[in-house]
Image: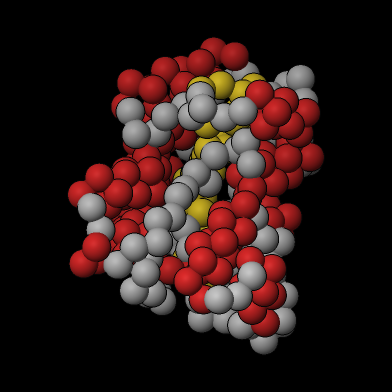
Amino acid sequence: MEQERTAIATGGLQGIGLAIASELTRQGMRVAVGARSGGSADRSALARSAIGDRGMVAPLDARSTDSVEAFVAAVRDSIGVVDVLVNAAGMSIHQTVSCHSDADWDTTIDINLSGPFRMIRACLPDMKTRNWGRIVNIASTAARIAAPTHAAYCASNAGLVGLTRAVAREGGAHGITYVAISPGWVETDMLRESARIMAATSGRTQAEEIAAIGASNPQNRLTQREEIAALVAFCCSDAAAGLTMEDIQVNAGALW
């Protein structure tokens, strides 16, 4: 039996992040969910229900170093020193390079790449001291296969995979593993919003767009968030001690 661990899951109020927080709790970890304070009361209540009384939900804006450091300190004081960090918060903007505003570009890079960097920087020293740690970044197949309408999203995820490799090399001698998990299309609110945007210009309905996305891979289905959560849980276990510096694709056989 592995010893009890303390984990942070960013973006844990919904989608893949919530599924990860729930699965890590089921695996016996104390889980701290961090999300921007704009999260609805219903979503906060759902997260609290998923992680139980031994976990915590608190405001976290990974764009702010002060917010990151305050959150990690609160986790340390409330439920324990962080053993596991899962960076699952992310966003996407449908826009080409030529039409990107500075503000949209900066926001996407800050949330998808700089935010995980700040979280890692805050958690890594304790992991080094304890000679054990697991860090998982939820990236995307967009890190390898580009699309002209997702310029900032592709760039931020490619950077996230590069950060994964650098930190894996830094943490290797201290028993810390670091992997990226890159899903393709996963059935989440983000997918549904993307389908709505695509439907506005394609002449198809949102439901037709979602069906087309599912049909675009050899398995003819959408990956479920619970599949990603199960893989994250394995990567955070003692059994995955040799699995590091990897970008694991979960794409149902599709390129994007």
* Residue for point 47% across, 21% down: 71
Q: Nearer the viewer, residue 148 or 18?
A: 148
Between 121 and 219, the one lying in front of the other is 219
Q: In the picture provided, is 216 more to the left or to the right than 135?
A: right
Looking at the image, the residue that sits furthest to the top is: 77
Counting from the top left corner in percent of width and height, residue 60 is at 47, 27
Residue 73: percent from the left, percent from the top? 46, 17
Residue 220 appears left or right of 189: right
- Image point 21% across, 67% down: which residue? 98
Asked which quadrant contains residue 144, the reply is bottom left
Residue 157 appears in the rendering? no
Which quarter of the rendered picture does the N terminus lie within?
A: top right
Colour convention of the picture: secondary structure
Measured along the vertical axis of the image, is residue 251 above or below residue 83?
A: below
**Count of numbered circles in the view:** 0
Q: Residue at x 67, y 86 (%)?
A: 218
Q: Is residue 253 above or below residue 164?
A: below
Q: Give me the residue at 71% from left, 61% from top.
A: 224
Q: Is residue 128 left or right of residue 101?
A: right
Furthest-bottom residue in view?
218
The quarter of the picture where residue 235 lies is bottom right
Residue 87 x %, y %: 49, 44
**236 above or below 155?**
above
Can residue 53 be seen from the camera position used here? yes
Q: Position of residue 240 (x, y in %)?
A: 61, 56
